[in-house]
Image (cartoon, helix red, strand yellow):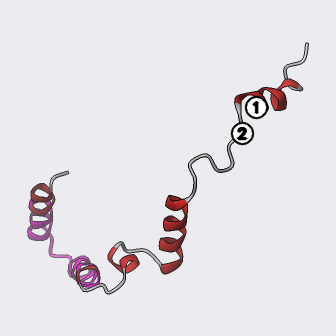
Amino acid sequence: MAIQEIKEKLHSLIEQTNNEVLLEDLLLEANSRIHATNPHEAEGLSKEDYDELISLVKESPEKDTISYDELKSSLSRWFMK
C-alpha cells in the first residue's frame, strides 16, 4: 500500500471515530515509534524478538536442510512394498 493511501485511510479513521481510548492508543504508538532510539522500538518489537529476527536473516538459507536423496532415504520405510 502506498504511503499516501495509508495516510488517507488513517485520516479517515481518525475523523470517523470519537473513541478516546483508540485515539490515545494511536497517538501513543505513533509517538513511541517516531521517537524510538532503538531499531526494535521503531518496529514495535521486543529486543529479544528483534534480535531473533536479525539472527534468522543472517542464517544460511540452507541451514537444517537435507538433500533429495536423504529425504528419499528417510521416507523409504513408509513406502516399502
Rendered residue at 78%/26% (across/down): 72
**Distance of label 1 from label 2 (alpha carbons):** 7 Å
Decide: few, some or many residues near mark 2? Use Cα within 10 Å; few <14, some 14-19, many ≥20. few
Q: Position of residue 6 (x, y in %)?
A: 16, 59
Can you tell which mark lies on residue 71?
1
Q: Is residue 18 magenta?
A: yes
For this rendering, which residue is in front, 51 or 61?
61
Q: Position of residue 75 (x, y in %)?
A: 81, 28
Decide: few, some or many residues near mark 1? Use Cα within 10 Å; few <14, some 14-19, many ≥20. few
- Disc tally is 2
Horizontally, is 55 left or right of 66 in the view? left
- The quadrant the C terminus occupies is top right
For label 2, the SS is: loop
Q: Residue furthest top?
A: 81
Q: Which residue is mark 2?
A: 66
Q: Kindly indicate the quadrant of the structure image that contains residue 42.
A: bottom left
Horizontally, is 70 left or right of 41 in the view? right
Label 1 sits on what residue type? Leu
Does label 1 or label 2 sit earlier along the sequence?
A: 2
Q: Position of residue 73 (x, y in %)?
A: 83, 28
For label 1, the SS is: helix
Above or below residue 1? Residue 46 is: below
Above or below residue 61? Residue 56 is: below
Can you tell which mark lies on residue 40?
none
Q: Which residues are magenta?
A: 8-32
Q: Position of residue 13 (x, y in %)?
A: 15, 65
Label 2 sits on what residue type? Ile
Rendered residue at 43%/74% (across/down): 45
